């Protein structure tokens, strides 16, 4: 299987504080990879390094075939990113947002026009083409944001708590979109605080104190930790944590 | 008995609110002291402004280049020219024969001044007791122009004095001053009152409104409003630290202008401070009014920057004389507190006039302050919207 | 001193709030909350939770309707309410540039009390962050900030504690700890009104109100809500997850089906289809390792069903 992310002994230190402590893992093409951990376990730092936003202190990481340390520009061009806090410009219209992101990632103009129509049709947003993003319900925004994040057909898309605060129906529709994307061969790297969502992932890693303490399919993890659900697994692992600071 | 109980409760409540108030003021000081960059800027800004303005006034006054057109060439003019030659402030670069050359000389030789003696200077002086001398000065740098004129007149004055002592006749030499390029020159040299007007406004109006807007932005205002603390105290306690800070700045400016720039306080220090307190009061209420309208620090900054600062710089008479503005702007300048403050400070500080002379300015500022305070209290929201 | 004038800690009658241009944040809200319980308002972002809380904390005014908190009217007697209510807004709202201790002392004096006076109430929470009392609040971790905010909201011993989405963005372990703290506070006699977008926290409340699009879908105990749920729910698993979902959606007898953790919840109304029929259908479609079990619905199932009804009614 093609490896889309390869990480070996990746470490990030801030002063004498080790935020990420020698983590190693691989993510395969088309996989949905859950990246879990308590607040302050080092998830955000690790994710920033993988997106080429933060140079690692030591260790090696390849994302989409590019070195995260020396080729961060290429990394950025081949990934999509979406977070709950920031995804779309609220004061731009729906089509303006799509065009903007298409433009940023160098999608040709005529292709942007064609793909915008397709995208809006698939989401059922044709009527909202000229609406301002701020007027859309939160669930719609998140769906649109995800579509925009994979507009340029990246090899891998990073989702940082994409479904926080979204209603249960929309949350599930969102996950169905994630499945579709994975079926198309896009690798999905996702963080979440919803433990039932962890069950939707092909494989899940759980970070504790900057290390990856568990990495397997949800089924195997539940067997290993003798838990009924992922929440049980998570509680057992995260309670081991010795550090509480962000 | 019930009366005493009520009284006791009322007193207790008063005590609690006082304690609340003081703890709020303390918190505000923490904010200011811990934001080192902003505090440094606020403390250094007035010094920087004064030194910058002050430096530009004190440059180039020595060895000013002058030319002389002496149509008389008699005892008196030669004596005066000799004095100019001996002065460390002037260096005589050229003797001119024809008035038509003067204009070109300014451009070519970068002259600062041309001294023009009329015909029959000594004769006029001796017979009529009155003689004319013209000082043509490059006014493009008004501060040095003003200094040059002062030096030149004092040299001519010194000669006049000598002459009077010898002959016991009151001679009168009338230096006629003609400024090239910036004939008004007015206002520009009075930068100390201008800086005072600007700094005090900056600290009081801008910083107060920003610090209240910050609480709204952070969401702490929500928590404070849902507390039993009277909302008006929340707002008033914001003004105290900036009031203190503006007093520190006022002291800095006055000390610097007296000891570094040698601009003495000609009038009463007491009334100068009293007048400044009124101006501070106006600006604090202005800051409160702004903060009751805006919800974000950025808007607060823009409003105080654009709506307050710009008119103060452009229209208050600090840079450009009000008399020369279009009528419309003259009207606008009437509602700018800084304009009245600057006029008043000039009267007390520079001209040395007493309280009676600033009664109009004082009353205008007091009136403005009362209107603003009422407006901001009326506008004050004890809810979020 | 009796503070509770009325029978209810919170009472809302026909509360309506519209934001310009025509966003209806709250539509005709009626709510009665008895004291000494944990009452949860549960719904997604944008459902109207924060607006309701702001009306109850006297921060904004409703367009229509009447509300009382601890027996006091939110419009005329707002000053009384502000004395007895503790409020923690959704965003972290403490002074980042003040230390932990300074924040606590400040809020104590704002409420006209001292830290010592009510230390007993916050002891268990504050003890956890006390070692960092000289650290600036801005440098605390998310969980510690939350504990500090809670301590500050409790420092005046409020009768009613209103918490707006205290657990949003907080990891499952810290969330569990937080709910344990709320339980302890309830035992101290404090009425707690809390909102959350996490459906799995519903079971930790005594009473819940499910809210969506400015309307309550249901107000009852979690147990009653689950019991009153009429359709049957089957939990279905097979070896092909995503095919399972599309296959089940094709069945006309199935009114809805959604992924829940590692299985799929299938909602069936009026017993239109039985466990065996489902099994056969899936076998016919090539599924293996099929596991079907009739289960009790979760609050999340109820929420989804009720939101479907709301959509149909509108």
Image (cartoon, coloured by chain):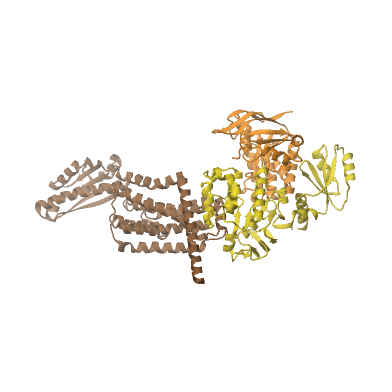
Chain colours: A orange, B brown, C yellow
Query: Does any portion of residue B310 appear in the rendered image?
Result: no
Query: Does any portion of residue C174 appear in the rendered image?
Result: yes
Q: Is residue C67 left or right of residue B17?
A: right
Q: Is residue A87 left or right of residue C288?
A: left
Residue C286 image position (x, y, % from top left): 87, 37
Quadrant (top left, top right, bottom left, bottom right) of the N terminus of chain C: bottom right
Where B204 falls versus A83 (above or below)? below
Q: Quadrant of residue C139?
A: top right
Nearest to the observer: residue A126 or residue B275: B275
Residue B97 image position (x, y, % from top left): 21, 43
Q: Quadrant of residue A52?
A: top right
Nearest to the observer: residue A67 or residue C49: C49
Residue at far front of view: B1
Residue A31 image position (x, y, % from top left): 73, 34
Residue B272 image position (x, y, % from top left): 33, 57
Count numbered badges in the picture: 0
Nearest to the observer: residue B347 or residue A20: A20
Quadrant (top left, top right, bottom left, bottom right) of the C terminus of chain C: bottom right
Nearest to the observer: residue C165 or residue B44: C165
Q: Quadrant of residue B111?
A: top left
């Amino acid at each position: 299987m093609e490896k889309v992310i390869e990480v070996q002994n990746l470490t990030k230190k801030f002063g004498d504080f080790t935020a990420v402590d020698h983590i190693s893992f691989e993510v395969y093409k088309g996989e949905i990879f859950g990246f879990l951990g308590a607040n302050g376990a080092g998830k955000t730092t690790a994710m920033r390094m993988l997106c080429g936003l933060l140079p690692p202190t030591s260790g090696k990481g390849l994302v989409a075939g590019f070195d995260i340390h020396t080729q961060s520009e290429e990394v950025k061009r081949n990934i999509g990113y979406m977070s709950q806090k920031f995804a779309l410009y609220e004061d731009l219209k729906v089509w303006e947002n799509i065009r903007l992101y298409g433009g940023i990632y160098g999608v040709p103009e005529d292709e942007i026009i064609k793909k915008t129509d397709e995208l809006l049709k698939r989401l059922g947003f044709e009527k909202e083409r000229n609406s301002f993003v701020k007027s859309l319900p939160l669930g719609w925004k998140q769906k649109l944001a995800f579509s925009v994040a994979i507009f340029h057909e990246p090899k891998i898309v990073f989702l940082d708590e994409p479904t926080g605060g979204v209603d249960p129906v929309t949350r599930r529709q969102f996950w169905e979109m994630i499945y579709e994307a994975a079926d198309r061969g896009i690798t999905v790297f996702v963080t979440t605080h919803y433990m039932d969502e962890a069950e939707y992932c092909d494989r899940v890693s759980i970070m504790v104190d900057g290390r990856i303490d568990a990495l397997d399919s949800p089924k195997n993890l539940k067997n290993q930790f003798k838990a009924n659900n992922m929440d049980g697994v998570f509680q057992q692992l995260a309670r081991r944590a010795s550090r509480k600071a962000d | 008995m019930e009366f005493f109980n009520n009284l006791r409760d009322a007193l207790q409540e008063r005590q609690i609110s006082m304690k609340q108030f003081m703890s709020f003021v303390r918190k505000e000081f923490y904010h200011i002291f811990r934001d080192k960059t902003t505090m440094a800027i606020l403390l250094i800004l007035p010094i920087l402004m004064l030194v910058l303005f002050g430096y530009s006034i004190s440059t180039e006054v020595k060895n000013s280049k002058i030319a002389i057109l002496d149509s008389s060439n008699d005892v008196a003019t030669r004596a005066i020219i000799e004095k100019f030659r001996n002065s460390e402030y002037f260096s005589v670069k050229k003797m001119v024969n024809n008035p038509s050359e003067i204009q070109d000389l300014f451009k070519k030789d970068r002259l600062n001044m041309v001294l023009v003696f009329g015909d029959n200077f000594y004769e006029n002086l001796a017979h009529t007791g009155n003689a004319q001398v013209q000082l043509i000065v490059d006014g493009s740098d008004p501060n040095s122009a003003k200094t040059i004129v002062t030096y030149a007149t004092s040299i001519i004055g010194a000669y006049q004095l000598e002459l009077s002592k010898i002959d016991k006749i009151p001679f009168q030499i009338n230096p006629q001053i003609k400024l090239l390029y910036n004939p008004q020159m007015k206002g520009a040299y009075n930068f100390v009152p201008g800086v005072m007007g600007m700094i005090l406004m900056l600290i009081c109006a801008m910083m107060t409104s920003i610090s209240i807007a910050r609480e709204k932005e952070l969401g702490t205002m929500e928590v404070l409003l849902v507390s039993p603390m009277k909302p008006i105290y929340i707002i008033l306690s914001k003004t105290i630290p900036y009031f203190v800070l503006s007093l520190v700045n006022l002291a800095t400016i006055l000390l610097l202008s007296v000891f570094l720039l040698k601009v003495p306080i000609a009038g009463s220090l007491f009334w100068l401070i009293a007048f400044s307190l009124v101006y501070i009061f106006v600006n604090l209420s202005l800051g409160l009014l702004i903060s009751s309208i805006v919800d974000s620090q950025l808007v607060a900054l823009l409003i105080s920057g654009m709506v307050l600062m710009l008119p103060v710089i452009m229209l208050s008479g600090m840079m450009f004389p009000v008399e020369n503005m279009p009528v419309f702007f003259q009207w606008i300048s009437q509602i700018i507190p800084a304009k009245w403050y600057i006029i008043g400070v000039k009267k007390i500080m520079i001209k040395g006039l007493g309280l009676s002379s600033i009664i109009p300015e004082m009353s205008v500022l007091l009136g403005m302050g009362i209107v603003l305070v009422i407006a901001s209290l009326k506008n004050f929201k004890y809810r979020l919207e | 001193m009796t503070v509770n004038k009325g029978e209810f800690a919170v009472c809302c009658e026909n509360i309506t709030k519209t934001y310009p241009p025509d966003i209806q944040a709250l539509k005709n809200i009626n709510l009665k909350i008895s004291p000494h319980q944990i009452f949860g308002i549960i719904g997604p972002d944008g459902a109207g939770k924060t607006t309701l809380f702001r009306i109850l904390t006297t921060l904004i005014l409703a367009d229509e309707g009447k509300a009382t908190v601890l027996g006091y009217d939110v419009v005329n007697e707002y000053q009384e309410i502000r004395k007895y209510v503790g409020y923690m807004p959704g965003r972290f709202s403490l002074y980042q540039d003040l230390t932990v201790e300074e924040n606590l002392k400040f809020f104590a004096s704002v409420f006209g009390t001292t830290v010592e006076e009510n230390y007993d109430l916050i002891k268990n929470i504050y003890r956890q962050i006390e070692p960092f009392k000289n650290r600036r609040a801005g440098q605390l971790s998310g969980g510690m900030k939350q504990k500090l905010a809670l301590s500050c909201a409790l420092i005046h011993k409020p009768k009613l504690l209103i918490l707006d989405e205290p657990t949003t963005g907080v990891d499952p372990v810290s969330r569990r700890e937080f709910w344990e703290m709320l339980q302890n506070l309830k035992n101290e006699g404090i009425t707690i009104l809390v909102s959350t977008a996490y459906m799995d926290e519903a079971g930790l409340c005594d009473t819940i109100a499910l809210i969506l699009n400015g309307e309550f879908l249901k107000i009852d105990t979690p147990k009653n809500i689950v019991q009153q749920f009429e359709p049957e729910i089957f939990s279905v698993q097979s070896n092909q997850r995503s095919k399972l979902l599309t296959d089940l959606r094709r069945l006309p007898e199935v009114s809805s089906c959604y992924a829940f953790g590692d299985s799929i919840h299938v909602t069936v109304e009026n017993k239109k289809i039985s466990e065996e029929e489902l099994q056969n259908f899936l076998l016919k479609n090539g599924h293996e390792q099929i596991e079907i079990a009739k289960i009790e619905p979760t609050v999340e199932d109820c929420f989804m069903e009720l939101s479907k009804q709301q959509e149909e009614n509108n």
